[in-house]
Image (cartoon, rainbow, N blue to C red):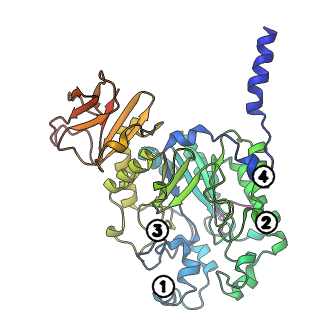
Amino acid sequence: MKKLIYFFLFCFLPLYSQTYNPSWKSLDTRPVPSWFTNAKFGIFIHWGVYSVPAYRPLGTERFASYAEWYQVDVMNKPGKGRDFHDRVYGKDFQYREFAPMFKAELFNPDDWAELFKKSGARYVVLTSKHHDGYCLWPTKSPFSKDWNSMDTGPKRDLVEELTKSVRSKGLKMGLYYSLLEWETPTPAKETNPYLPSEIIQKYRIPSSQYINGHIIPQLKELVNTYQPAVIFSDGAWDETSAFWNSESFLAWLYNEAPNKDEVLVNDRWGKDAHGSHGDFSSSEYSAEDETMTTSRPWEESQGIGGSYGFNRAESIEDYKSSKQIIHLLIKKVSKGGNLLLNVGPSSDGLIPVIMQQRLMDIGRWLNVNGEAIYDTQPWYNHSHEIKNENIFFTKNGDTVYAICTKWPDKSIVLPGLKKNAKVTLLGSDIKVKVRYSKDMLSISPPLVSPGNMPCEHAWVFKIN
């Protein structure tokens, strides 16, 4: 018996007592917590002071409609956006004057959490601080005094309230955190800062204290206080990870965080880290997944509209339909990734009704077809041989799922499957006929009508 105990300790204890050094070489050896790659679908929330003006003129190019960039790309650049600001708020109205108007008076975290649960999401990521530096929690940093949700605006700890509600629904709770603050230029932006010099002179954090006296303490404060399951870092693109002291912080996180076995981070910790380091790669409004593989976890984030923060300039034509979002989820998951779908609440704390409707539709679809999404991996065996752009594949163990984004008008022919395969249509008791010939499985789509269709937008054939 003693020998068995010693064997167990020798073989398994090192898995849980691994110490990570502050270097990418060491940090990159950390196993990724499996809950993330199994979850597949999360909700992103961009909410803050920028939700008060909630405006940016729409553009067709990528990133052009981000209303959370109001301070930089609306207020401080000539054109339609600046004209709007001057007309509505006045030429002398400063960005920080929006903070008292960010009241969140209708914010009910339980309502949000219930909606996210019904959407079928498995995790939630809230912007604790965006590039404007405003914090949604009562941070202890002296540089954020009067620039946080407890001192100015709602007079509430918004991070704590939502974290509690989300976890009560059985979902994982994560936090977005911007390393960049526009009011404090980093060395690369000294000659071309994001904001006018008078704003920087008034609010700038001393360079000697910015990282180790403000950024790192805030990150540790969030971890120790709220124990986020995900830390979605952002804004690190102008400097390297050495400037941000990223490796040191992540070594602390992996070694000492109270939830160190659960927490994971994205790759935005310096311009040298993106796509290479961190626990998973993160992209936005892109097709980067075309080159990503299952060798590294990844996540694509997109808004229901073209903006992350609520943008009043957007109309129904600028919002994805429920069908488009469900197809987006299917595509990302079938290629091995997660989808982080963003909602942008208004400043009063309400999620726009059209966004709520989209989330409810996704949830209804996942109630029927969730087993083809959650806990799955891509099925690559022979899927490349199937010339049909409307069929995507996932697998879980020996089960393969053929997800059809268009109801098939002819038989689905699949290579590489066993002769005795059993096929069912998820959500339906209708018998599915199959044939097996020359190492090919042929699935005949059953006759369906609006009365017996199991769901809308996409249909799944389960192949055991």
SS majority, magenta: loop
Furthest residue to the top?
Answer: 1
119 or 397, nearer to the observer: 397
Q: Tag 2: residue type?
A: Ile
Q: Earlier in the sequence, mark 2 or mark 4?
A: 4
Pointer 4 local density, CA inside 10 Å: few below 14, some 14–19, many at least 20: some
Which residue is rendered at x = 78% and y = 74% of the image? 205
Query: Is residue 95 shown left or right of residue 354?
Result: right
Q: Where is residue 21 in the image (x, y as percent from the top left)?
A: 81, 47
SS at circle 3: loop
Do the residues under discs 4 and 1 have CB atoms within 8 angstroms?
Answer: no
Q: Name the residue under label 2.
A: 211
Instruction: Identify the residue under disc 4.
Output: 23
Distance between the Cα atoms at labels 4 and 1? 43 Å
Is 128 or 318 nearer to us in this picture?
318
Q: Earlier in the sequence, mark 4 or mark 1?
A: 4
Among numbered discs 1 and 2, the one appearing first in the sequence: 1
For disc 1, the neighbor class at 10 Å (few under 14, some 14 to 19, many from 20) is: some
Residue topped by disc 1: 81
Q: What stretch is highlighted in magenta?
A: 134-139
Give the amino acid type for the residue marked by disc 1 in the picture. Answer: Gly
Q: How crowded is mark 3: few (under 14 residues within 10 Å), some or many (20 or more)?
A: many
Q: Is residue 273 magenta?
A: no
